[in-house]
Amino acid sequence: MALIGYARVSTQEQNEGRQLEIFSELGVDKYFIDKCSGKDAARPQLTMMREYVREGDIVVVTEYARLARSVRDLLTIIDEFHSKGVQLRSIKEQFDTTTPQGKLILTIFAGLAEFEREMILQRQKEGIALAKKQGKYHGRKPLPFDEKLFRREVAAWRKGEQTAKETMKHLQMKPNRFYRKVKEFGL
C-alpha cells in the first residue's frame, strides 16, 4: 500500500507548494503535479497517476476540485480507482470513497461545486450584459494593428527573407492571431 498524491494548479505561474506541504505532512510516497486547468480530465500527470496506482494504494488530494471539475469526471475517476482497488482521500472535504456514505457525500459535494461554478459564470454574463446596457463595458480593447507593416513583414516572410517566428516577433503577434490575419488578408 502506498500513499499517492495528486496536486494541480491552474496555471504555470501558480504555486503548488501548499499542496506538497500537506503531502509531506501525511507521508505521501509519490506525487504527481499538473499545471493546467481542471476542466479537462486529459491531463498528463493525472493520466500517469491513473496508470501508476495499484490495488491497495490510496490517492490523496487536498480537495476534490484538484482532481476534477465536473461530477462526471470525478465519478469516472473514482469508478476507475474502485475497479483497481484504489481508495481516494480528500483532506479538505474529509471523505473516503471506501464506504457508500463517503461516495454519496463526494457526489453531493461535487454537484454543489459544479453548480457554484455554473452560477458564477451566469452571474458574470448577467453583469457584463448590464454593464454593456449602461455603456460601462465595451469588451476588450482591440490590439493595435498596422496593415501596411503587416503586409510588408508577411511579404518578407513569403520571400524567405525571414522565418514566420521572426515575422511574428517583429509584429509582436502570437501565432493564432498572425495566421488568422494572413488568412483574412489572403496573404
Image (cartoon, rainbow, N blue to C red):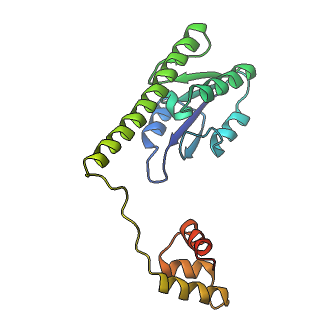
Q: Quadrant of the N terminus?
A: top right
Looking at this rendering, what residue extends furthest in the front direction?
Answer: 133
Residue 124 screen position, x and y as percent:
37, 39
Residue 119 screen position, x and y as percent:
41, 30
Q: How many marks?
A: 0
Q: Quadrant of the C terminus?
A: bottom right
In-image side of 69 versus 128 (left or right): right
Q: As rendered, which of 103 and 71 lies closer to the eye? A: 71
In-image side of 46 versus 26 (left or right): right
In-image side of 125 versus 110 (left or right): left
Residue 182 screen position, x and y as percent:
60, 75
Question: At x 50% / y 31%, what residue is drawn?
Answer: 65
Q: In terms of image quadrants, where is residue 184?
A: bottom right
From this view, report whether residue 54 is shown above or below residue 107. Answer: below
Question: At x 49% / y 79%, what residue is drawn?
Answer: 171
Residue 41 screen position, x and y as percent:
63, 38
Q: As rendered, which of 56 and 122 lies closer to the eye? A: 122
Q: As rendered, which of 77 and 143 lies closer to the eye? A: 143
Q: In terms of image quadrants, where is residue 153?
A: bottom right
From this view, report whether residue 162 is shown above or below residue 63. Answer: below
Question: At x 56% / y 81%, what residue is drawn?
Answer: 167
In-image side of 40 versus 170 (left or right): right
Question: At x 62% / y 13%, what residue is drawn?
Answer: 98
From this view, report whether residue 111 is shown above or below residue 179. Answer: above
